[in-house]
């Protein structure tokens, strides 16, 4: 069965996890000789051609499949799609079924809709939530989520089934050499190296960016040879053994992950993090809070360490325990690589969506 063209849509042209998943799917579909393309709402290159959300449906080729990953205006985008269009939505966060929250965190109304007024000050949150729900009912899209956690929440709010297709990335054939990566970056082979990484760096609210420096200082007090890279902010700076890097391309981040001992990921909320998958593909164990879909990626004490959400003291102690045990770091890194190669490859993700497009 030959599939019709698949038109993917995201908010950003190049940046962000949703856009990367869309682009990986497009590449995978094209390898299967299935026509596929991307539309987006914000250009990040001089030659990028953005569209407004309300233009999406009007620009769909006849018979094409619409696959939505994210948008800055769900009601406008969904209402632009004609009745009868085969529509697929991948939930990369919670915005489709909330009044504006990407992640409601500890909102007391999470299981009951939206409060009015919203405790987090999203305007007209309940009206917006109902407008999105009305469009979902009209279009009857196929919904997917990369984590069981988000699928459960979405089903509760949207009152419909949600398929689970974990995110996947290209997986290398073997773990890269740590010593070679350190030589390229000028890092002492004997040093202990930790890495924080998030878009926004120390200003990344959902990733606890404001806690990175405190975690680093507490670890450094116990481990004098510790070197820390904090990646994703807006400046490049070095403060003794704390190195701040701005947002870097994937190749540079992969090189740094290959050189590091542990990724510290104190995220407050997450669906199915591509950063964690990148770390696993490079044999890098992760210490993270046990939130959202993170426990579906990390197996505690096998591929990394999971910590009770929000417990910074426990997070620091878990990182200290792991950093003090180099053989455990190597073992966890290898287990993370092997586990991820079985579960989170790009090919497996593409195959899952192709079955979905075919109605299987």
Image: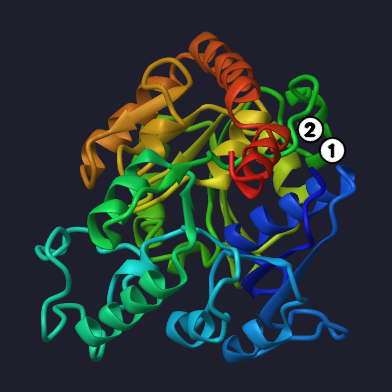
For the point 78% across and 28% down, the residue is 172
Crowding near the residue tagged with mark 1, few <14, some 14–19, many ≥20 C-alpha atoms within 10 Å: few
**Residue 224 in view here:** yes
For the point 72% across and 68% down, the residue is 14
For the point 59% across and 25% down, the residue is 340
Residue 211: mark in rendering? none
**Picture layout, residue 173 above or below residue 138:** above
* Quarter placement of the N terminus: top right
Residue topped by disc 2: 181
x, y (%) of residue 90? Answer: 52, 57
* Circles 2 and 1: CB atoms closer than 8 Å: yes
x, y (%) of residue 241? Answer: 56, 46
Left or right, 100 with respect to 71, comes to left
Crowding near the residue tagged with mark 2, few <14, some 14–19, many ≥20 C-alpha atoms within 10 Å: some
Of residues 31 and 134, the one drawn nearer to the viewer in this rendering: 134
Task: Please identify the quarter of the rendering in which residue 43 is found.
Answer: bottom right
Of residues 242 and 271, the one drawn nearer to the viewer in this rendering: 271
Task: Please identify the quarter of the rendering in which residue 341 is found.
Answer: top right
x, y (%) of residue 208? Answer: 36, 57
x, y (%) of residue 332? Answer: 52, 16
Residue topped by disc 1: 184
For the point 40% across and 55% down, the residue is 213
Element under disc 2: helix
Q: CA distance from mark 2 to mark 1?
A: 5 Å
């Amino acid at each position: 069965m030959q599939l019709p063209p698949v038109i993917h849509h995201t908010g950003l042209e190049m940046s962000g996890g949703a856009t990367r998943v869309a682009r990986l799917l497009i590449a995978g579909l094209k390898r299967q000789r299935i026509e596929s393309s991307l539309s987006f709402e914000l250009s990040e290159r001089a030659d990028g051609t953005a569209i407004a959300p309300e233009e999406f449906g009007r620009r769909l080729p006849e018979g094409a499949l619409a696959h939505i990953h994210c948008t800055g205006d769900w009601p406008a985008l969904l209402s632009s799609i004609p009745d009868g269009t085969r529509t697929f939505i991948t939930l990369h966060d919670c915005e489709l079924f909330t009044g504006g929250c990407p992640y409601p965190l500890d909102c007391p109304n999470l299981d009951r809709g939206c409060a009015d007024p919203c405790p987090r000050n999203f305007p007209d949150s309940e009206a917006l939530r109902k407008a999105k729900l009305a469009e979902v009912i009209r279009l009857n899209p196929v919904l997917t989520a990369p984590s069981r956690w988000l699928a459960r929440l979405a089903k509760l709010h949207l009152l419909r089934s949600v398929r689970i297709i974990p995110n996947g990335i290209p997986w290398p054939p073997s773990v890269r050499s740590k010593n070679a990566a350190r030589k390229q970056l000028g890092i002492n082979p004997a040093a202990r190296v930790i890495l924080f990484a998030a878009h926004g760096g120390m200003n990344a609210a959902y990733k606890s960016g404001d806690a990175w420096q405190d975690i680093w200082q507490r670890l450094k007090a116990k481990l004098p040879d510790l070197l820390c890279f904090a990646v994703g902010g807006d400046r490049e700076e070095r403060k003794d053994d704390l190195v701040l890097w701005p947002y870097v391309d994937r190749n540079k981040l992969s090189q740094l992950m290959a050189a590091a001992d542990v990724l510290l990921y104190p995220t407050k909320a997450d669906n199915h993090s591509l950063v964690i998958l990148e770390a696993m593909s490079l044999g890098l164990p992760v210490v993270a809070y046990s939130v959202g879909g993170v426990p579906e990626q990390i197996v505690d004490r096998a591929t990394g360490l999971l910590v009770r959400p929000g417990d910074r003291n426990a997070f620091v102690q878990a990182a200290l325990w792991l950093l003090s045990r180099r053989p455990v770091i190597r073992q966890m890194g290898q287990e993370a690589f092997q586990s991820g190669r079985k579960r989170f490859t790009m090919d497996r993700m593409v195959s899952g969506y192709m079955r979905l497009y075919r109605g299987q």
